[in-house]
């Protein structure tokens, strides 16, 4: 390692806290935006289900809207993660998220992040919400989720 490489490495090490802080903010902003968009649809779903009306047209529109949100935030094409139903209980209320932790691999060539948080169930239990995100064409995208 020559002196210039050593100096560049030292600069990078000195700026790691700022790099991590910016990356953490980007991960949280991505998951927050994803939750916010899904939550809006879930509120509508809840009111339709509470009304008791059998509205198959609404069901098709709602799933299409959730699928569009999914395509915006996800990079994993597996059908397992694509929305296929509606629910009377919103599951993406950001105001209920707590104990957020961000983990990163610090690999410049294959940046991966893990977002982990607690989310309370309406019946009293607690779920772990864990998302793996990766940088794709300069944007953070969700690749996997674990609950």
Image: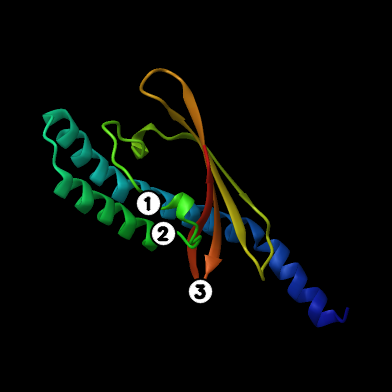
Secondary structure state at the residue bearing disc 1: helix
Q: Which colour scheme is used?
A: rainbow
The Cα atoms of the two marked residues, 2 and 3, are separated by: 13 Å
Marked residue nearer the N-terminal end (1 or 3): 1
Q: Where is residue 27 in the image (x, y as percent from the top left)?
A: 49, 54
Judged left or right of residue 90, residue 142 is: right
Q: Name the residue under label 2.
A: 73
Q: Name the residue under label 1.
A: 34
Identify the residue shown where x is 36% and y is 52%: 33
Q: Where is residue 70 in the image (x, y as percent from the top left)?
A: 38, 56
Judged left or right of residue 34, residue 77 is: right
Q: Disc 1, disc 3: CB below 8 Å? A: no
Marked residue nearer the N-terminal end (2 or 1): 1
Q: Where is residue 131 in the image (x, y as percent from the top left)?
A: 53, 47
Establish if 19 lies above or below 59: below
Q: Residue 137 carries which label?
A: 3
Could you say which is closer to the camera, residue 104 or residue 81?
Answer: 81
Could you say which is closer to the camera, residue 65 or residue 134?
Answer: 65
């Amino acid at each position: 390692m020559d002196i210039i490489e050593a100096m560049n490495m030292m600069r990078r090490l000195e700026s790691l806290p700022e790099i991590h802080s910016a990356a953490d903010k980007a991960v949280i902003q991505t998951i927050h935006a994803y939750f916010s968009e899904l939550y809006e649809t879930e509120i509508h779903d809840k009111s339709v289900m509470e009304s008791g009306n059998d509205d198959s047209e609404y069901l098709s529109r709602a799933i299409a809207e959730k699928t569009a949100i999914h395509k915006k935030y996800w990079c994993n094409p597996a059908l397992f993660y694509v929305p296929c139903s509606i629910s009377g209980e919103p599951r993406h209320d950001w105001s209920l998220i707590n104990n957020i932790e961000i983990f990163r691999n610090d690999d410049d060539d294959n940046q991966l992040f893990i977002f982990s948080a607690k989310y309370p169930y309406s019946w009293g239990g607690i779920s772990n919400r864990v998302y793996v995100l990766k940088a794709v064409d300069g944007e953070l995208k969700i690749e996997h989720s674990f609950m």
